[in-house]
Amino acid sequence: MRQVWTLTVAQAFAACGTITLVAFGGIVGARLAPTPALATLPWSLSIVGMAAASLPAALLMQRVGRRPVFIGSALLGALGALACAAAIAHDSYLALCLTGLVFGANSAVVQQYRFAAVESAPPGGAARAVATVMLGTLVAAVVAPALGERVRHLGGWPEYTGSFVVLAALLLCAALALSQVATPPPAPAARRTEGRAVRELLRVADYRLALLGALSSYAVMSFIMTATPISMHVHDGFDGHATAGVITAHLLGMYLPSLVSPWLTGRLGVRGMMLAGLAANFACVGIVAAVGQGFAHYFVALVLLGVGWNLLFVGATAVLAGAHAPEERFRAQGFNDLVVFGCQAVASLLAGFALESIGWTALNLATLPLLLVTTWMVLRRGEVTPAR
């Protein structure tokens, strides 16, 4: 498990990039955007960048190995953080959007830390390895918003410029941690074309289930979460501390369950994990988010949303680990992330427009069809036993 813990430390630093953008990107975007509907565009473009880079990053890892790509991506993320700070300092909305793409490309690689962890896990340990690496993001969820809020006026620069300057230093620490990761050498060229094509993988029921589960977890979470800072801060008048507090609680809801995810997998099974995640999402949408827009409503809704994401995503990743052969892993993993983050990008991009046009309550209820389809698929498949 040493390899898994090394990746967890790297994740703790690297995940600060996404979390800083989540916590402050919408607020900065609302200040710089020409219209409130475009406030979430920089965050949405980061997800576009993540989706676009997912498959190329996986194929590059297949060619040169995981560690060089991991380290290079962290260095690119550090440069992106400095560019984002410069964009904020010079009130450049266009530059802010472009740096979102850079953050997304780095995030695509960070997402694949979990696959490196699964590869070093013992048989049957896929869920435990994924949950352990996600603990790194739990650390980032606690540290990044608090640290970013504390240094937002650093150097007398425009607000939140300092948050991204400090983020660059954190990403350099991620690169240092990744230099200690030992990954298998790249496969010989003759083996890179072995295995089934993507269209054949999509005929595998477990691969489809893993893809839909991960897609649902990310699309629903991103759609609601992206709109939350704008709804709270811009529409309902909550101050930055209250908004950051709700986002922090949401991020804790996303990653704190990783402490017990391996135990839950043993007790509930993968199917039970996914159904529990879906139930938390239904509770967020149907019971809490549609009731009111007070601080407590936002707080409870976003915690439930985070818990639902964690359980559904960990379960889907465990299914994915057993839905392909070893020689197919880069193709299967890269295509999975391409689709998942592509749909997340669409959801995030639509969040700002949906909030402005139909309001907070209808925005939440609009996620129900996807949740219902995913629930039907999980129930239809029954219990799934991953290969690892």
Image (tube, helix red, strand yellow):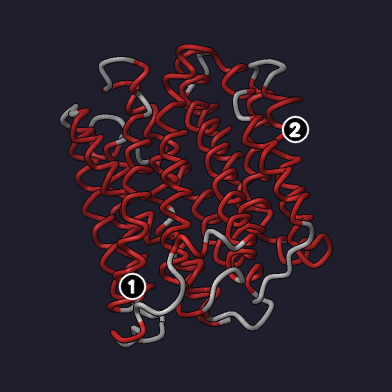
User: In the image, which disc is placed on residue 283?
Assistant: 2
Whether residue 11 sits left or right of residue 282 in the image: it is: left
In this rendering, the answer to whether 231 lies above or below 176 is above
For residue 270, which quarter of the picture? Answer: bottom right
User: In the image, which disc is placed on residue 61?
Assistant: 1
Residue 367 appears at what percent x and percent y?
61, 30
Depth check, front residue: 85 or 266: 266
Return the residue found at the far right. Answer: 267
Q: Residues within 10 Å of mark 2 (few under 14, many from 20)?
A: some
Residue 265 appears at what percent x and percent y?
76, 63
Q: Quadrant of the N terminus?
A: bottom right
Distance between mark 2 and mark 1 Cα atoms = 39 Å
Q: Amino acid at mark 2?
A: Ala
Q: Secondary structure at mark 2?
A: helix
Badge 2 or badge 1: first in the primary sequence: 1
Residue 339 appears at what percent x and percent y?
45, 49
